Image: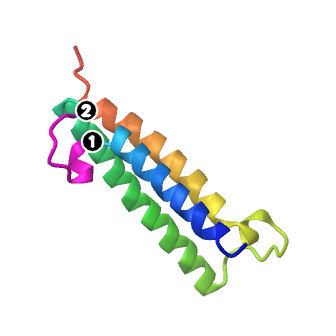
């Protein structure tokens, strides 16, 4: 029974590696292989979206931490946020990624 968490971590790590190698641009993975499914423009867009999203997620985490330090966070004992704050950050990350996709895609799309 003590082996099950390690097996779960191993399977998750393997799946995560397969998915990232398949869908992320080669520049983000530091791969020597130039066989990439994205052209240079798409790769730049993808990397810019990831970078902007990462910065905003860090801002969101720091803001939440600041609110907790000064005592302005909601004190709901049995709420889903107090039990699973990761859900809030995953939802915030999805919203931020979608917003950054549209703003970055608009920037790289020609007007004509």
Q: For numbered disc 1, what is the local secondary structure?
A: loop
From the image, give the main secondary structure of the stretch colored magenta. loop
Circles 1 and 2, Cβ within 8 Å, touching? The answer is yes
Q: Position of residue 9 (x, y in %)?
A: 55, 64
User: Which of the pair 9/104 is nearer the observer?
Assistant: 9
* Mark 1 or mark 2: whose residue is earlier in sequence: 1
Residue 73, quarter of the rendered image: bottom right
Label number found at residue 42? 2
As for residue 31 lying within the magenta part, the answer is: yes
Residue 70, quarter of the rendered image: bottom right
Task: Tell me the quadrant of the picture where the N terminus can be found.
Answer: bottom right
* Visual colour scheme: rainbow
The residue positioned 32% from the left and 38% from the top of the image is 104
> For this view, does 15 lie left or right of residue 90?
left
Total marks placed: 2
Q: Residues within 10 Å of mark 1 (few under 14, many from 20)?
A: many
The residue positioned 24% from the left and 38% from the top of the image is 43
As for residue 60 lying within the magenta part, the answer is: no
Which residue has dot 1 on it? Answer: 25
Range of the magenta residues? Answer: 25-37
The residue positioned 57% from the left and 55% from the top of the image is 90
Label number found at residue 80? none
């Amino acid at each position: 029974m003590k082996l099950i968490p390690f097996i779960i971590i191993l399977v998750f790590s393997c799946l995560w590696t397969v998915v990232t190698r398949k869908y992320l641009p080669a520049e983000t993975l530091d791969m020597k292989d130039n066989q990439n499914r994205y052209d240079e423009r798409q790769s730049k867009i993808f990397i810019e979206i990831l970078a902007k999203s990462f910065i905003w997620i860090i801002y969101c985490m720091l803001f939440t931490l600041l609110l907790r330090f000064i005592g302005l966070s909601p004190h709901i004992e049995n709420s889903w946020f107090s039990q699973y704050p990761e859900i809030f950050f995953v939802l915030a990350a999805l919203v931020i990624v979608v917003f950054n996709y549209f703003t970055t895609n608009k920037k790289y799309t020609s007007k004509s």
